[in-house]
Amino acid sequence: MDPDSNQASDDVSAIARVLAGEREAFRGLVEKYQRRVYCGALRIVRDPDEAEDLAQEAFVKAFTNLSRYDPRWAFSTWLLTIVTRTALNVARARRGQASRRIEDLPEPFEPVEPGAGPRDRAARNEWAERLRKEIDALSEGMRLVFGLRYEDGLSIEEIAKATRSTVSAVKVALHRARKILKERLKEFSDFA
């Protein structure tokens, strides 16, 4: 059986238990998705403390609106939509303020292979650090859709729904982000 369908089935089962009055079942969903929700908020607001607050707010919204969840969508997609919209509202509200930068982004990259030599590891680490900086330098919109697609694994349609955008706008933003990153990282062609 497909691991994704097992995960979806587990989520739907937990949601049914919560809706039946077993509120403690929601804790398992929080534990399962807290890192993804936090990273989704952090990608938008770029402040670890604010992202933590937004993640908590998103879980509260999810809990209070759980009866409105549509099981045709993955619960993770629904939850990421909530945190994305919540964080975008905060980002829009403070748009006139200088944006804050963070020093430590969560590590979204695969570790270097265990058998890799020191030069390979150093080159890979240099590439990963440069990639993080270049992703951070993308516009807010490109950074958001890029992260939802490549870090969270959402489909184009799911991203469009989460960001209240069109499929074509998401495709354009992803295309431009990839093009910019490819150009900026061309010296690392072995890794890109």
Image: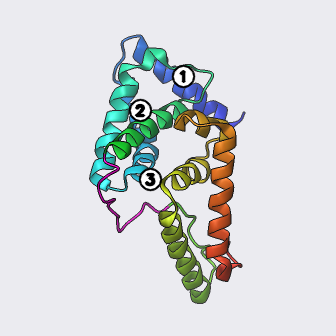
Disc ID at residue 187: none
Q: Is residue 138 left or right of residue 156?
A: left
- Residue holding disc 1: 12
Residue drawn at x 62%, y 84% as measured from the top left:
120
Q: Secondary structure at mark 2?
A: helix
Amino acid at the residue labelled 2: Gly
- Is residue 61 positioned above or below 134 on the image? above
The reply to whether discs 3 and 2 touch (Cβ–Cβ < 8 Å) is no
Q: Percent position (x, y) of residue 106?
A: 43, 60
Q: Is residue 143 left or right of residue 30?
A: right
Residue 102 colored in magenta in the image: yes
Disc ID at residue 28: 2
Answer few, some or many: residues within 10 Å of disc 2's Cα (few below 14, many 20 plus, some between 14 and 19): few
The kind of secondary structure the magenta stretch mainly shows is loop
**Label 1 to label 2: alpha-carbon separation:** 12 Å
Q: Which residues are magenta?
A: 94-107
Amino acid at the residue labelled 1: Val
Residue drawn at x 31%, y 52% as measured from the top left:
96
Q: Secondary structure at mark 3?
A: helix
Q: Is residue 50 left or right of residue 63?
A: left
Answer few, some or many: residues within 10 Å of disc 3's Cα (few below 14, many 20 plus, some between 14 and 19): many
Marks 1 and 2, the one that precedes in the sequence: 1
Point out the frontmost of discs 3 and 2.
Answer: 3
Q: Percent position (x, y) of residue 3?
A: 66, 38
Residue drawn at x 37%, y 24% as measured from the top left:
63
Marks 1 and 3, the one that precedes in the sequence: 1
Q: Which corner quadrant holds the N terminus?
A: top right
Q: Percent position (x, y) of residue 160?
A: 60, 37
The colouring scheme, among rainbow, by chain, secondary structure or one colour, is rainbow
Disc ID at residue 43: 3
Amino acid at the residue labelled 3: Arg
Marks 3 and 2, the one that precedes in the sequence: 2
